[in-house]
Amino acid sequence: MADTLLEVNIEEAGYDGNHSTIEQVEFAVKSGQLTGLIGPNGAGKSTTIKAIMGLLTEVKGTISFTKAGNHYAYIPEQPVYYETLTLWEHLSLASAVYGVDETVLEREGNALLERFRMTEVKHHLPDGFSKGMRQKMMLMIGFLIRPDIYIVDEPFVGLDPRATRDFLALLEEERRRGAGVLMCTHVLDTAERICDDFVLLSNGRIVVSGELGDIRRAASLPEGTLFDCFNALT
Ligand SMILES: Nc1ncnc2c1ncn2[C@@H]1O[C@H](COP(=O)(O)OP(=O)(O)OP(=O)(O)O)[C@@H](O)[C@H]1O
């Protein structure tokens, strides 16, 4: 049995004046496992992530990082960056904040730049980057700090096929190291291929959670794709 890294038991959470945007959202993220958080627009995926990250004031329930000292990396869908810092300065800053050694930064940072084919723009400001390049910067920062848990919001939309492949390969390496991953996505064919289990949200509630077999049983589609099951259940 894989170790549980994060236990989410949200009774209710929401925004000012509405405390029940999501209700009874319960799941765990385990070491070496990839959990897909899926659901239609407005289902409550981002709200769940915000609750996990402590960004909502109105949360009833518990969010537990089960091992002392565990840390997570949040890789947002919309890149967040400092306009006045270059790509390399972003990597250096993240290293300083998360205690990544200077020699590790040099080695791993440059390897990540190569891997994502960003070496040429190492000393450029992200304002001049494309959307996908900014997203790659977010991914590199996440991978550089080697967290115990990755929380990744919709990684596939801005990335080209090669970057997607590189990202998935790195994620696989990190899972083998023991990292757990929680990933929000609408790209269900990829999710079906890479996730170990799923939490399907609709209207702020869990419709079904578990492995593909559990989702298929709930949808009464024994051979159904995740996409078919998603349509049947939401
Ligand atoms: N800042 C906010 N203030 C008030 N309500 C919000 C806020 N952000 C989201 N909501 C509401 O919370 C509900 C869930 O939204 P959420 O952003 O969690 O959905 P989602 O599953 O991430 O959707 P999408 O796939 O479109 O990103 C929606 O009804 C939305 O209108």
Image (cartoon, grey):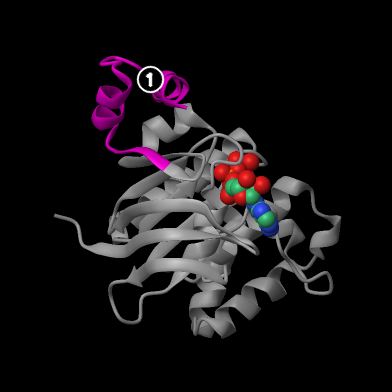
Local crowd size for mark 1, using a 10 Å CA cut-off: few (<14), some (14–19), many (≥20): some
**Which picture quadrant has residue 209?**
top left
Q: Amino acid at mark 1?
A: Thr
**Residue at horizontal 77 percent and vertical 68 percent from the top:** 123
**Residue at horizontal 53 percent and vertical 32 percent from the top:** 187
**Nearer-the-camera pick, 3 or 122:** 3
Q: Residue furthest front?
A: 17
**Nearer-the-camera pick, 149 or 161:** 149
User: Is residue 110 in the magenta section?
Assistant: no
**Residue at horizontal 32 percent and vertical 53 percent from the top:** 27
**Which picture quadrant has residue 134?**
bottom right
User: Is 230 above or below relative to 142?
Assistant: above
What is the x, y in percent for residue 228? 42, 18
What is the x, y in percent for residue 167? 51, 47
**Nearer-the-camera pick, 130 or 13:** 13
Would residue 118 be visible to someone looking at this image? no
Q: In the visual, does 23 lie left or right of 221?
A: right
Q: Residue furthest left?
A: 1
**Which picture quadrant has residue 212?**
top left
What is the x, y in percent for residue 85? 78, 74
Give the extent of the magenta segment.
206-234
Of the 4 image quadrants, the one containing the N terminus is bottom left
- Residue under numbered circle 1: 225
